[in-house]
Amino acid sequence: MSAKMKVLQIIQDTPFINDFFRITCEVDKPENHDFAVYFTNSGDFNKLINLDEQVQARTRYKGANCFNEALANIREYDKVFNHNLTYEMHEFLASIPRDIKVVWFFFGSDYQHPEWKFGEMLYDEKSIKYAQQKQEKLDAINSEVTYDPYNPKFLLSHYRKKAEFWREVMRREKRKYMEVKYRMTERIDYIAGYNDLEYEFIRSNYPTRAIYLPSFYTHFTAENTLVPTEESAGRKERSILFGNCGVAGNNHEELIDVIKDKISGKSIKVKVPLSYGDPQYIPHIKKKLSAGLKSAFVPLDKYMSKPDYYSMLAQTDIALMNHKVNQAGTNIFMLLFYGKKVFTQKCNVFYRFLTRQGIKMFTMDDFRAWPIERSLEPLSKEEIEHNRKTIYSIFSKEKQQENLKRILSI
C-alpha cells in the first residue's frame, strides 16, 4: 500500500467489525484506516454500543452527514471497504472516482433483499404468505374517501381508481429501488466473502463484474471456541433449538406441526430465540408457536450475555435452522463445536458450502423422515472432532491474515 494512501471503511454499529479490525491491525498499521459510521434508521451516534475502542478511535466520520464529509476527503484513500451494501450509500458510491477501488464485504441480508423480489428464495410457503401480507400493509395507502351509503357504486369506482393509482406508484418505487441497487453493484470492483456460492448468486442476479476475494470476519481457534461444561449432564429433559431470531426467514411456521407430532408425549422442550428481529413478526410467531407446541415452547425473548447464550447452546441436543439462505452462521458454528446435530435446508448455500468441506450436517428432510429418537442421537466423538478440525482449518487466523493482506494489496 502506498505510504500516503489509506482505506476508508464504511460500517454500521455492528460487533462484526471488531474482530475484523483487530486482525487488520496485525497485518497493517491502524492509522492507514478511517471509519465512517452510519445508521439505516434513527440512532444515537454518541452511543456506538457495538464498536470497541479500537474502532471508535479510528472513526473519522459519523452521523447523518458522514458520506458527504467522507467524499470531501475521498482523495486521501485508494480503497473503500463497504461492509453491508445498503440503500443509504448509493449516492456516495456513485460519487467515488473510478480509480479508487471499492470492495463489498457482503453480509447476506444485503444481496438477499428486498423481500418482494427474493421472497421465494427466503421463505417457505407459510412464511412467504406472512411476508406478502406484511408488504401489502406497507404498500397500502389509506383512502380519505368517506363511505356514502347512498352511492356505493360511485364509492367503489372511486376507491378502485385510487387504489390502482397507488399500486402503480408502488410499482414505480420498487423499480426505482432495484435500479439504484443495480447501479450500486455495477460500481463494485471486488466482492469479499467466505462462500463462493453466494458470490455466484450475486453474479447471476446483479449486473456486476466484480472479482471474488476470499474473506471472513471471525477466525476460530481452540482458544476462542472453548466448549463449556454441560451442567445439565444426565438430565432427563431433552431440548431442541429452533431458529436463531425473530424474523420470518427462520421459516418457523412450516415446522410447528412437524415438531408437535414428533415430541408429543415426550419430555422435550423447544427453545426459540426471539430477543431480537422483526417487532411485528415476533408476537405473530409467538402466538403460533404457543398454540402449536403448548408447554413445550420456551421463548428466549430476553437478552442473554454471550457466555450464557453459549452455555444454552451447549445444553441443547439438536438445532433446527430452517433458513433457506445463509443465516445463523455463528450459532451453527458454535453448535458444531459443541458436538450438536444441526439440521437445515438442503438448498441453503451455507449447508452446501460446509458439507462440501466435509462437515457433518443434516437436512430438514432427515428431520421430517426420522423418528425423534434418531434425530436426538448424538454425533460420535470422531464426527465431532472432525467437524471441529475442519472449521479450524477453513476459518483459521492464518487464512484470515492472508486474505486481508491480499485485499490490502489490490
Image (cartoon, rainbow, N blue to C red):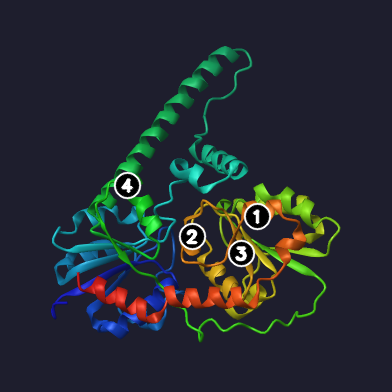
- Please give the label number shown on residue 350: 2
Residue 128 location, quadrant: top right
Label number found at residue 206: 4
123 horizontally vs 107: left or right: right
Q: Position of residue 205 (x, y in %)?
A: 35, 45
Mark 2 or 4, nearer chain start = 4
Picture quarter with the N terminus: bottom left
The residue indicated by pointer 3 is 342
Residue 262, x across and y down, in percent? 77, 54
Kind of residue sitting beneath label 3: Val
| Residue 210 x/y as whole percent | 25, 56
Disc 1 is placed on an element classified as helix
Residue contact at pointers 4 and 1, CB within 8 angstroms: no
Give the alpha-carbon distance from disc 2 to disc 4, as whole Å. 20 Å
Circle nearer the N terminus (2, 1): 2
* Residue at (51, 35) in percent of width and height: 140
Q: Residues within 10 Å of mark 4 (few under 14, many from 20)?
A: some
Foreground mark, 3 or 1?
A: 1
In contact (CB < 8 Å): disc 4 and disc 3:
no
As helix, strand or loop, the secondary structure at mark 3 comes to: strand
Q: Residue 267's spot in the image, x, y percent? A: 83, 65
Label whose residue precedes the other's in the sequence (3 or 2):
3
